[in-house]
Amino acid sequence: MLTRILQYGRKIFGLEHRLEQLRDNRIKPQIPAARFYKAVFLLFLCRLPSLQALEGYRLQSALRRFLRGGMPCIDQIANISETAHLQDLRALLQRFYRQLGRNKVLRAFHGHRLAVVDGHEINASYKRCCPACQQRELTVNGQKRIQYYHRAVVFQLVGPGFRLLLDFELLGPHEDEGTAALRLIQRVIATQPRCFDILLGDGLYPQARFFKLLRQHHKHALMVLKDERRDLLKDARALFTSPPSHCFQQGPTTYRCWDEAHFTSWESYPQGVRVVRSLETSLASDSAPAITKEWIWVTTLPQDEVPTRNIVIFGHERWRIENEGFNELASYWHADHYFHHHPVSITAFWLMLFMAHALFHCFLRNIQSIRRQGHSFLYWADLIKAEFVLGRWLFSSA
């Protein structure tokens, strides 16, 4: 299975050649950068938990053929990762996006291209830190202690049947998530302006700076309205005094919706926005009572272009970055492990992880013989790992 996915990556994405073209910022390097990038890519594709685990296979003949030489040791990989050329890694992920678009894998969703931006805490420690760490004071067993951690913002494209983790931005020291997210969104718009037209975000993102940036580039915002913006939430609730204007059923859930345009009490964004409220009741069963949940979204999407039902459907797509992004990466791809504690290294490892993740899911989606068998993605992921661990993979240089 590992052999097949590498062959697929070579054929569809020219992956081996692209990895060998990646650069780093060392002067007169003794170890080619390609060996570092290809080793780290294989680390993630095989879902190995650490660099130490990968080093245990450094004498494997197939691995040496894949790297076109000996694998760097752990210290060498760590040192090289601090000099990784992040611009090259992001450019390679953008190539993934363009190829997936040409192959009709990333498609519009009800006529729109959706993206999600969200923050994620990577790891925390009371001992290990670097100059770029965030820090907070906690009380542990009655004593105040400083905890160090990193937090990042991720940009993900979502659509019918597929998603692509496109970019990653680490927060700087004492920096808030919104500032890092703004930097990330600006970079994506500058490099891939057509990859999305609606940006989804959680309760942190109903901020005028995001809405103004998106509208400046003819894009729309669709953000959850929650307690983080109590002033807006209170004013929005005052709109919903009449009976719901839209009701529909989808599966076991009944949706009762209110849709109000021209919400103008947001002083920092006087252009006016649209507010949609959804009360969603899941049918009772023998084992569980009926449950009703409330959702409120604020958006720049006009009523005559996007109906209420689609606003609700789009709004719930934000959960995919949690369920099919962060949770999967943390639970099954060891994303929250510090492979090397340095801000450039952390970013480089995450971007390489995004590539391995994209190749894996694209491979499963497009190989018909795999799709017909009906196994979970973990079944195939375990086969890839087992083939590597047992040394039963073949790799021939192109």
Image: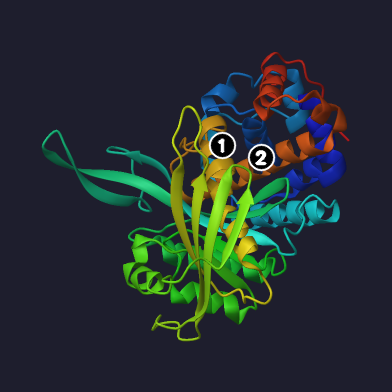
**Image quadrant in which you'd find residue 65:** top right
Please, which residue is most extreme toward the front here? 243
Q: Are marks 2 and 1 in contact (CB under 8 Å)?
A: yes
Give x and y (percent) for residue 42.
Answer: 67, 32
Please, which residue is most extreme toward the top here? 390
Residue at 76% across / 26% down in the picture?
A: 374
Q: Mark 2 or 1, which is nearer the eye?
A: 1
Left or right: 1 with respect to 42? right
The type of residue carrying mark 1 is Glu
Give x and y (percent) for residue 237.
Answer: 39, 69
Above/below status of 143 relative to 304: above
Image quadrant containing the N terminus: top right
Above/below status of 294 relative to 301: above
The type of residue carrying mark 2 is His
Left or right: 315 with respect to 310? left
Residue at 78% across / 43% down in the picture?
A: 15
Q: Which mark is residue 166?
A: none
* Residue 349 at least partly seen: no
Above/below status of 280 relative to 237: above
Q: Which residue is mark 1?
A: 328
* Residue 346 at least partly seen: yes
**Image quadrant in which you'd find residue 370:** top right
Q: Which residue is mark 2?
A: 357
